Amino acid sequence: MIFKSKTNPPNNYFNGKRIGVLGLAPRCGTTHIAIAISNYLSETEKKRVSLIEQNRHNDIICLAYSLGAKDNGPFTFHRVTYIPFVSIDTNGLADLGSDCMVFDLGCDFKSGLSRLLLCDIKIIVGNDAVWRMGEYDKLESFPSIYGALSSWRLFVNLGNIKHMREKDRYGMTVCCFPFEPDPVYPGNDTVDFLKEAIYG
Amino acid sequence: MRRIIKGIRKTSTFHDRLVKEAHLLKNLNNPHIPRIYDLEEDDEYTYIIEEYIPGESLKSLCNKRLLSEKEIIHFIFLISSIIEYLHALPGNGLLYLDIKPENVLISGDNCFLVDFGSAKAEDDDTDVVFGTRSYAAPEQIRGEKLSKKADIYALGMLLKFMLAHGNVTRKKEAQLQALVKKCTGKTVWTRFGSVKALMEKIKEINNETSSFSEKPLEIAFAGAAPNLGTTYIALLFSAYLKNLGRKCAYAEMNESEAWYSISPHINELRALAGLEVLSRKFCENRDIAGSDIIKDYGTLTEYMPKEFYEADAVCILVGNRIWETDEIKRTRALSKKCIHRLFLVNLTDALLKETTDSLASEIFMAVPYIRDPDEFLNNPDISSVFQELAIKTGVIK
């Protein structure tokens, strides 16, 4: 029952759709994909988007400094509001007034999973690079009920079509994330992919 | 010598052209031009008895596979030598005027020029010859009086075609593209003065072989963070050097055993390049004198051993994301003691401005993701990346 109550919150609980992005391991492209999704939703779907960092990697703070920010606080770039690492404060998040909230849950799979369950769209990020094949072992113990739900996606960075079928066994929609050099300005391939993968 | 007999019906529209061509070829004596032995005729047919050449056209060969650098240089030299022979024929020479991949027959290492239907003497003003668009010189398309420079133009275009269908190192490609440019000048006086001059240049390029470092090198690899692909790139680079004919071994200098996680692919690489993979312990007891050694130190930290900094070249892998620029700065600071270092921006072929700004004043290059380790030696884009790395690390001088 806990699952039902988390996926069907009262309408006023969050003012928008929550998309969670959780990586299987460090450097598999979680922040990259979270930023690409945020910018796609903002630019193409014309939504007010907040990207909330819920991991301690400080990638968003590094991004802020690269973009010229002066402090560690929230900032807006390209119409996306970036919120560096915050502890889960649902009341605060409800005040953001966003149409969509994208949660960058980092790559601590165990703790991230409980947060991912709170999201309407749950994206797990894997990486198909030759040296990272073992990381999918984490999904072997994944309860099959999770995967059977339509809200789950497995996005595979550097995906190889040949390997995609093997990953069908996890039960969730599996998609190869296209090569995207700059997620702040997602290209046409990425936009087409996200259109299909998120709302398709 | 095998011969074939071509029967041409006398009423055919091609009859006169083919018979004229056969008479012309009969008087030529070049090992790269099919020999015409005889012409016979009866009431209905003219028969041409000519040398049978097994093989396929350059065009069809290029549709099947990429040409090697050696083949491109060899073939363009041979074809130029045929044209040079034609241009030097008694009188004022013969212009071929239809050089194109379809008219070059490849038979093993040898190549032949066929279809002399457009050939004519330089001082023959009777026919207007248009040649084949994209290979014909501008003056030929305009129907103007032609000279030997028209054939030089077409040779340039043929070389351009081969380069587009070839696997050539960046250095050689630049040299050969310069020849293409010189051959295909829009105005005749900007082109090579003669085919001989072109052949001299091809010879020069051919003789200029890449020289390798005489002493075996020690090249260290380290990544700015775990999971960047350091081991993978170090292994592929070792295989590339081995494939160049260098004696080379890969040694894992950390305890991660990362190479083990990609062992299925390492097996394929071993088969491909005879690569020797050594663990740190194994490496210390092994005689690897006279061999380049690629040392994989894993992740760069502030506690690197002295020999890391003293390696002949240190390759440091970094990422290409906007939020990784701080990591690049940290990596630069950690590796400043290195005698010769270069930065490899991994998993990309499009460097972000933020990345290039962070690496300003450093030697750096982009390394795209190599999806299929079996294919990387045959993929010209990938092998050119490793060639650049070999040059930057001093293996190729």
Image (tube, coloured by chain):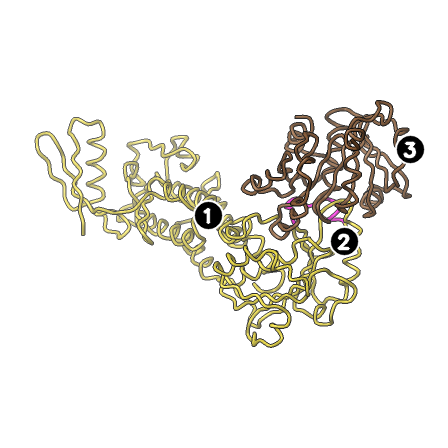
Using the numbered discs, state the Cα–Cα distance from disc 1 to disc 2 in whole angstroms.
36 Å
* Same chain letter for marks 3 and 2: no
Front disc: 3 or 2: 3
Please identify which colour was used for chain A in the image. brown
Task: Please report, as a chain letter, where disc 3 is located.
Answer: A
Instruction: Locate residue B336: give its quadrant.
Output: bottom right
Using the numbered discs, state the Cα–Cα distance from disc 3 to disc 2 in whole angstroms.
34 Å
Instruction: Name the N-terminal-most of marks 1 and 2.
Output: 1
Q: Which residue is mark 1?
A: B166
Front disc: 1 or 2: 2
Q: Secondary structure at mark 3?
A: helix
Crowd band around label 3 with a 10 angstrom C-alpha radius: few (<14), some (14–19), many (20+): few
Magenta stretch: give its range.
B347-357
Q: Secondary structure at mark 1?
A: strand
Q: Is residue A37 magenta?
A: no
- Most foreground residue, A10 or B290: A10
Instruction: Name the spot of residue B387 as percent of width and height, x first.
Output: 56, 57
Q: Which residue is mark 3?
A: A92
Instruction: Name the spot of residue B97 as percent of width and height, x first.
Output: 34, 39
- Most foreground residue, A196 or B45: A196
Crowd band around label 2 with a 10 angstrom C-alpha radius: few (<14), some (14–19), many (20+): many
Task: Please report, as a chain letter, where disc 2 is located.
Answer: B
Label 1 close to label 2 by CB (< 8 Å): no
Q: Which residue is mark 2?
A: B328
